Amino acid sequence: MSTNTITSLKVLSKKVKSTVEATLQETGGLLRLAPCWVPRSFLQPGKRLKLHPDDLYAYGLNRGGIDERWFASTTPAANENRTPDEGLSYVVAGKVRFTLQQAVAECGATIVGSEIWSKYKRWPVYSKFFDNMGPIPHHMHQSAAQAKRVGQEGKPESYYFPPQHNNVGNNFPYTFFGLEPGTTKAQVRRCLENWNKGDNGILDLSKAYRLQTGTGWLVPPCILHAPGSLCTYEPQWGSDVFGMYQSLVEGREVPWSLLVKDVPKKHHQDLDYLVEQLDWESNVDPNFKDNHFLEPIPVGDTADQGYVDRWIVYGKVYNEQLFTAKELTVDPGAECKITDTGAYGLICVQGRGTINGQTINSPKLIRFTELTEDEFFCTAQGSSAGVVFKNTSTTEPLVCLRYFGPEANPSAPGIKAAKA
């Protein structure tokens, strides 16, 4: 958002609550959101976010290319030299704009639901499209306990590879996960010792899986992973902590600072501490795929009614359901009313139609400052009352992804149950 827009928001802050309440009354619980673009200085954009090619470096070449779009986010991006609102989604209500973070702070349980507000006092999750030309370094995200040592929160995450954003696989559509069974801590420590010698060889200790569009993975904290080059929908916890364990990727240096970014300063050269950050049992699990791979599961038998809703992210992290996600497909000309049990962020990835009477469509190309009609936040109350999706096309399905907060879907399948 422009500086002028941010300034005007400060003037309007007292009106946020009344504006939100009036909007929710009008839309049946929906808030329209503007695109939230995030650059990464150490990565190369994959060019599948529908962002205009002239805008890939809209933040400036020094900030890096835009290879992420964040959805319904109240989580700041942990980038150096970031803009004040980087990573924060904006609500669009007529000619008024303010962050979703402001809306949640002012309206609390009205937006995120009483259970989430009571426990977290915020919207504690977010999702994004991650779109890179090639693979990224083998890395992990700290657990809640580890991240707390540096004043942050841990970061479990999940992946889904939407076919609509993966017409090409780019340079390396394979992801390394974990470590080969039998790998020792001494071997990983040796990789860290060899950091400045070139490729430190960490991938020699891991295994790559070919990525399949229309499937996904659940990735708890402290598990090494080197995401491949498919565009990925990533519901995750509201944190941006990580540690890179690979020193060289496609010939590009990974600085040591990205390994220790979220590590207490006294441990920045403590190789044993860095190795012990890893959840060893999970990393060397011989049944890793069985315990983390996600295949879509229909919510019900509704195809003859003109729509199909499917679980695309499910399962628990350390026995807690921290986030879930669904993919709704509505046939051309069809209409359905979808009732859920929690608030959610929604992005339309294909087609056009209406959602509670509000226009929704998936754009072909987006300029950096352009407002779209493809993203909404649905409140807990709006979700439980039911949202009406209507596909106004006669030829193309309407496809929407939506992600939910913690413990919102007690009926969601577990990974083991899904494979039984």
Image (cartoon, rainbow, N blue to C red):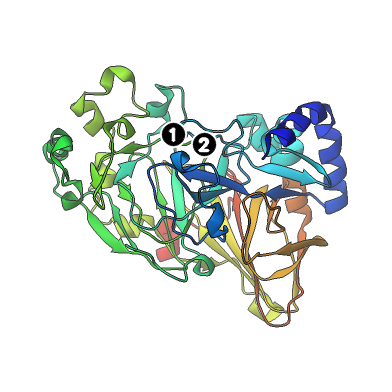
Image check: 265 left or right of 73?
A: left
Q: Are marks 2 and 1 in contact (CB under 8 Å)?
A: no
Quadrant location of the N terminus in the rendered image: top right
Quadrant location of the C terminus in the rendered image: bottom left
**Which label belongs to residue 77?**
2
Image check: 58 left or right of 378?
A: left
Q: Amino acid at mark 2?
A: Ala
Mark in front: 2 vs 1: 2
Percent from the top left, x then y, of residue 22? 88, 42
Res 220 → quadrant: top left
Residue 392 appears in the figure: yes
For label 1, count other residues whose C-alpha is less than 10 Å away and answer few (under 14), some (14-19) or many (20+): many
**Which label belongs to residue 34?**
none
Q: Amino acid at mark 1?
A: Gly
**Which label belongs to residue 154?**
1
Percent from the top left, x then y, of residue 21? 84, 40
Residue 406 appears in the figure: no
Image check: 310 left or right of 255?
A: right
Q: Residue at x 87, y 47 (%)?
A: 25
Percent from the top left, x then y, of residue 206? 21, 52
> In the displayed structure, would residue 171 be above or below residue 65?
below
Give SS at disc 1.
Answer: loop
Q: What is the distance, in whole Å, between disc 2 and disc 1 at their CAs?
A: 14 Å
